[in-house]
Amino acid sequence: MFSEDANILKPQSEAAGRMREYADVLGELHIVVLGKGRPIHTPNLFIYPAKMRSCGAFLAGRQLCRKNRFDVISVQAADDIGLAGFLLAKLFHIPFQLQLHTDVFSAWYRRASWKERTRYLIVRFLIPRASVLRVVSLRIKKSIESRIKDREYRIINLPIFTDFTKYSEARRNEETDRRFENYEFKMIAVGRFVEKEKNFLMLIDMMHELVKKCPAALLVIVGDGPDKKNYESRIMNQGLEHNILLEGGRSDLPSFYKSFDLFLLSSNYEGWGRVVLEAMAAGLSVVITDVGLAGEVIKDNENGRVVPVGDMHAMMAAVLDLYKNPEKRKKLAEVGTAAVRNLIPQTKEEYLQKYRESFEIK
C-alpha cells in the first residue's frame, strides 16, 4: 500500500491502529508512507517511510517488489504517489487497487487549484487501469459510473469505520457548559483549516448576518491549518470576536459536542464526512452542504438539513429555521442519531471482513 498519511508512523495514532487491524485481517501488509521516521516491522505489518514523494515511493516500492510476491498493490492517493504505485503494478504484473477518499469529480474540487485539477486528470487516467476501486461514498461511485463509461468496474463502497459509541455515550462537560452559558444558540464546526475545501469563510460571513437576528449566537470552529490567520482576520474585521471562536484540536470532542445545539459542515467537497456522523451520534442536529454522505445518509428535512454548496443564504436560512424551531431541531437530532446506529457495517468485525473483500480481484 502507498499512503501519504504520516500519522501511520506514530504507533499511538488512530491511523496506526487501523493499519494494525488491516494487517491482521489481510494476513500481511506492507506500507510505503510519505514521512520521516524509522521503519516499523512486526510479524505482519511493515511500514517504510519515504522522504521523496513519487521518486522515493517508487524506489522503495520497487525494492519491496523485488524481494516479495504481492497479491495487490493499493494506493490511497490519486496523485504522483498513485502513479508510482500503478507503474509498479504494471512493471511486476500485480493487480492494482485504487482508493478514492475524496470526491475528485466535484466541479468545486477541480477548480480549487492546479493541484486538484492535476489530481482529477490522474484519476481519469488511473480508473480504467485499476483492477478494483474502493470508494468511501455512493456519491463517488455514481460519479465514476456516470463519467467513465468505456468499461465496467468493480467498485466497493466502504467508508472508514468509526466506533460511534464513544460519542453517543459521552457525558456532558459541566466546565464547557459554564464557559458558554451566556450564549443563547451554540453551533460547532470541525475540520482542517483549508479554505478551498472546508469553506469556513462562508460560515464567518453567515455569522455576520446571523448575529443581527440572534446577537447571542456562538460558532466554535475546531481545528487548525494553513488558513487560520485568514479566518482570524475575517473574524476581527467583521467584529465577531465574541461570536466566533477558533478552537484548537480537542481530544474530548465526544463530550465537547454535548454543549452545542447544532453542527455545521460548509465544505465545497468531501469524500464522506465522518465528523457529521460523529456529531449526530453525540445527539446534535446537523446542517451540511450537499457533499459526501448527503443524500446517502443525511436526507434533507428527514434527519438533517442539506443546502447547496457555497450558498451562504441557504445555509443561514436552514440555521435560522432550526434556531426558531427547537422542537424540529430535537426531532432531526433524534432521527439522525438513529440513522447513525443503523449504519452498515455496524460492527468492527463486519467492517474488517468487507475491507478484506475489497482487495479481492475477481
Image (tube, helix red, strand yellow):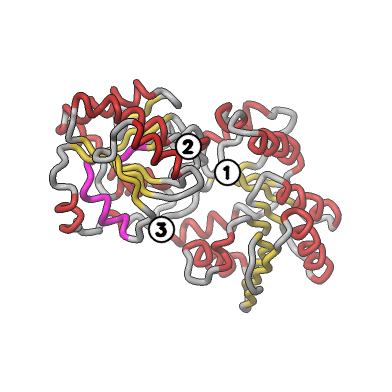
Left or right: 256 in relation to 70? left
Closest to the observer, 146 or 313: 313
The stretch drawn in magenta includes residue 115? no
Q: Which residues are magenta?
A: 252-264
Residue pointed to by mark 2:
292
The stretch drawn in magenta includes residue 257? yes
Residue 347: mark:
3
Closest to the observer, 187 or 169: 187
Front disc: 1 or 3: 1
Where residue 201 appears, as percent x and y from the top left, is: 41, 33
Front disc: 2 or 1: 2
Q: What's the CA distance linking mark 1 and mark 3?
A: 19 Å
Lower position in the chain sequence, tag 2 or tag 1: 1
Lower position in the chain sequence, tag 1 or tag 3: 1
Residue at x 31%, y 59% (from the top left corner): 252
Task: Check disc 1 and report its element: helix, strand or loop.
Answer: strand
What kind of residue is marked 2? Gly
What kind of residue is marked 3? Thr
Task: Check disc 2 and report its element: helix, strand or loop.
Answer: loop
Residue at x 80%, y 65% (from the top left corner): 65
Q: How busy is the neighbourhood of tag 2: few (under 14 within 10 Å), some, or many (20 plus)? A: many
Residue at x 57%, y 30% (from the top left corner): 106
Residue at x 58%, y 57% (from the top left corner): 5
Residue 108: mark:
none
Front disc: 2 or 3: 2
Where residue 191 appears, as percent x and y from the top left, is: 43, 46
Residue pointed to by mark 1:
135
Q: What's the CA distance linking mark 2 and mark 1?
A: 11 Å
